[in-house]
Image (cartoon, helix red, strand yellow):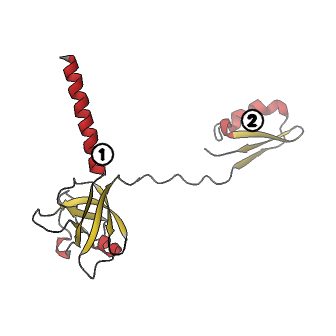
Amino acid sequence: MQILVKGSCLLLLSCLCSLSDAQSAYVEEGTASYYHDKFVGRKTASGEIFTQDKMTAAHKSLPLGTWVMVTNKANDSVVILRINDRMPQWNKRSIDLTYSAAERLGYIRAGLAKVRIEVIDPPNETPPPPDPGPPATVFIEPLPVKAIPVANKLIEPRYPLDYADLLPKEEKKVWWKVWPR
């Protein structure tokens, strides 16, 4: 019985993993359109208020919150969008984009475009850390060599010593070169 339960769990886990992989490998080619202004201010299927300036889209079957890369096959322009709304199942189009997204893909005048839709991982929303800049140099003058333990206690709270190099420049003076974390 215990072996059967373990085997069932492994089978379920492998199915879930393959579903996740299949979802991220999803590719569709079809026709894109863009929303009419009459939908501005209305709630989408996800509950968000629709505006034409967001980079979002409606799709018939992709889960809400899915991120997609849409490529206009005519000019190779690309946009990254989040699915936040639904389209009717009877609709022949594959995806409905906001005006902003359609404008970036370059099909406003035509109204429709042949596109490639690929499911992607969510974009990294964490901004990169700021550039620490050049290393800071802290000058301690005059400082007898005997006073190094005291200097360590003063410098450590602001500049961890694992990032510091002791640079003796003159006798009886010590200079510290410190890199920010």
Q: Position of residue 60 (x, y in %)?
A: 17, 60
Q: Residue at x 36, y 67 (%)?
A: 78
Q: Secondary structure at mark 2?
A: helix
Q: Secondary structure at mark 1?
A: helix
Q: How many marks?
A: 2
Q: Position of residue 104 (x, y in %)?
A: 35, 73
Q: Is residue 51 above or below residue 161?
A: below
Question: Which quadrant would the C terminus be assigned to in this image?
Answer: top right
In this view, the residue in front, 139 or 67, is 67
Mark 2–mark 1 Cα distance, whole angstroms, equals 55 Å
The furthest residue to the left: 90
- Amino acid type, mark 2: Ala
Q: Residue at x 30, y 59 (%)?
A: 118
Report crowding for label 2: few under 14, some 14 to 19, many 20 or more residues within 10 A (C-alpha).
some
- Amino acid type, mark 1: Asp
Q: Position of residue 30 (x, y in %)?
A: 23, 67
Q: Residue at x 23, y 78 (%)?
A: 111
Q: Quadrant of residue 165?
A: top right
Of the numbered discs 2 and 1, the one sitting upstream in the chain is 1
Per the image, the residue denoted by label 1 is 21
Report crowding for label 1: few under 14, some 14 to 19, many 20 or more residues within 10 A (C-alpha).
few
Q: Is residue 12 above or below residue 54?
A: above
Per the image, the residue denoted by label 2 is 151
In this view, the residue in front, 78 or 158, is 78
Q: Quadrant of residue 62?
A: bottom left
Q: Residue at x 28, y 79 (%)?
A: 108
